[in-house]
Amino acid sequence: GENVEQHPSTLSVQEGDSAVIKCTYSDSASNYFPWYKQELGKRPQLIIDIRSNVGEKKDQRIAVTLNKTAKHFSLHITETQPEDSAVYFCAASLGPNDYKLSFGAGTTVTVRA
Amino acid sequence: DGGITQSPKYLFRKEGQNVTLSCEQNLNHDAMYWYRQDPGQGLRLIYYSQIVNDFQKGDIAEGYSVSREKKESFPLTVTSAQKNPTAFYLCASTIGASGTDTQYFGPGTRLTVL
């Protein structure tokens, strides 16, 4: 099955700086890559996703890039703010006909004021 | 997210006991999922159900059982056969049974074995 590795496991950044989280996947057939954010004590929520026919997607201060050849995708958060402190999970699936999301282990992001 | 509820929030189990975790959704979603969350291991799929009266094993189904008698409900039973059940359990649902549908999560149940 699909194996998703996520790095780093923890990330501390100064407020206003950028944060980058990288994930690699094993199954070249995977074509859907969402990112979920889980704030302390709360449930995970989708923040952005990308499909394999797109190389980059942006939504305000967050962006995701995908390199299909290298089988990795990354989350970029610019101008970090204290409310960006959370655990971020990447995931991968084989697309509409695949019921299952394979999640990475998560990255704990701490934004220092 | 208020459309998915889980109960109880905290659950304590003695050795050898079976316990059942509740998951209810009023989003009219077809598919429902159970995940286990352990520190440093992300979310691991236990069971999923695409339609009523049908469910499939995920990656770590051993020691767990589920039922899907109603569209709105997908309870998870942690049996005594589950050797290390202490974890945070998350239920999720999707509008369809597609891998590209957004997963909406419940607030979770933290299970502790005494």
Image (spheres, helix red, strand yellow):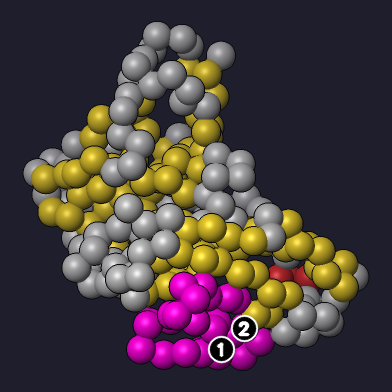
Residue A17 in sight from this viewpoint:
yes
Say the numbered circle drawn on residue A59: 1
Residue depicted at 13% across the width and 54% down the height: B51
Residue receiving disc 2: A62
- Relative vertical location of residue A55 with respect to residue B59 in this rendering, above or below: below
Q: Position of residue B52 (x, y in %)?
A: 11, 49
> Disc 1: which chain?
A
| Residue B71 in the figure: left or right of residue B76 | left
Residue sitting farthest toward the front: A69
Verify CB contact (< 8 Å) between mark 1 and mark 2.
yes
Question: On the picture, is A62 further left or further right than B2?
Answer: right
What's the residue type where badge 1 is placed? Asp
Residue furthest to the top in view is: B16
Q: Is residue A49 magenta?
A: yes
Foreground residue among A8 and A27: A27
Number of the label disc, if any, that sits on residue B68? none
Magenta segment = A48-75
The disc labelled 2 sits on which kind of residue? Answer: Ile
Kindly state the secondary structure of the residue where label 1 is placed: strand
- Chain letter of mark 2 equals A
